[in-house]
Image (tube, rainbow, N blue to C red):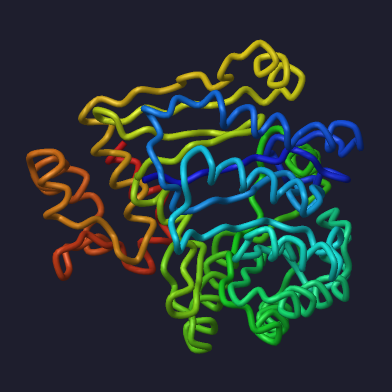
Amino acid sequence: MFSLYIHVPFCRRKCPYCDFYSVPAEAAALADYPALLCRHLELTDKEDWSGPVETIFFGGGTPSLLPPAAIAAVLTRTASLFGLSADAEITLEANPGTVTPATLAGYRTAGVNRISLGIQSLQSEQLQRLGRIHSSQDARQAVAWARQAGFDNLSCDLMFALPGQSAAALQQEIGAFLDLDPDHLSCYGLSLEETTPFYHLHRAGGLALPDDELYRQHYLELHETLQGAGFDHYEIANFARPERQCRHNLTYWRRRGYLGIGAGAHSFHQRNWGRRLAVPSDLPAYATALDRGSDPSQEIESFDRLGAMSETLYLGLRTAEGVAEESFRDRFGLGVAAAFPAALRQAGPRLALREGSWRLDLQGWLLFDHLISPFL
């Protein structure tokens, strides 16, 4: 069994903070892309990827630019080649400015059973600053349409620590999102990636971001408010109602196998200590390779035992469940304390073995990059 990630690299307009691979959404390229995805699935080595598929995630870019018939075609081909688990979680990311009642109903009929809406903010000024193509009304309407279409597993993205965002504005923002009654919230602080316009604007002095202390206050406010509203804080940036964690993303954090198809997609294979593969972020080259009958995926990293131990902790400590000591010992032949004694000392009380698993506390999550670096 494995999970499947499908990258749809098309956007109507690229957001100035985004560094994911995407290209302009031209009609011809959109129309041709589902056949490329199906061809990629057909060329995948079935000995490496033995089904059934447990989770599928259409990410991007903007997957909701593909019509429901295209999503249905890819899901049908996946099922015929690998099989689907009876309870497979199938997620589609959607921009609120690209959906209608008909398309959402079509996605649900096609087999999508989890929708992830990239709302980011419900405040008009912030949406404009972030370069989003939708309005707050579009976002609210998309949620209502998704519910009408039969989606009972709905996630929303929320960005915090935004330029000029006060504590009062954040509290208003959280309340507005809770009014939407989502099942899951992914909450991200605005980060600056070197390839993005926001990074260069910040370097030029044209974009001021909150300092570390304000970021900490916003993060703790999210934690307290969302937990008080019945959400589990199950990963650094993710909150879910009971039984509504994103199973696909848990595959990543548990370091389990997943196949990535589409231009710019990544895969992880568990063979030996693990190896990572990537499809080049180049749509014409992707199409050319498939036309020639070649799997476009290329190995970019192969892990040794130490690297596998480090990455297991790097991924697992992001989650509330942490890293189970017994599983770590069974996999690697020694426990976490024996493998990383110096790193554990540096982590101090922020990282502890509780109920059989190594876990960071909330303050440890705030210091994650600092605390995890000695393990890498």
Q: Nearer the viewer, residue 374 or 108?
A: 108
Q: Residue at x 19, y 50 (%)?
A: 344
Q: Is residue 33 left or right of residue 181?
A: right
Quadrant the N terminus occupies = top left
Q: Residue at x 72, y 60 (%)?
A: 107
Considering only vertical position in the picture, is 249 above or below 290?
below
Give the residue at the far front of this rendering: 80
Give the residue at the far right of this rendering: 27
Q: Nearer the viewer, residue 78 or 164?
A: 78
Q: In terms of image quadrants, where is residue 74?
A: top right
Quadrant the C terminus occupies = top left
Q: Is residue 225 left or right of residue 104?
A: left
Across and down, in percent, residue 297 comes to 54, 22
Q: Residue at x 8, y 39 (%)?
A: 333
Q: Nearer the viewer, residue 149 or 338?
A: 149
Q: Residue at x 17, y 48 (%)?
A: 328
Across and down, in percent, residue 244 comes to 48, 73
Across and down, in percent, residue 239 comes to 50, 71
Q: Is residue 356 left or right of residue 296?
A: left
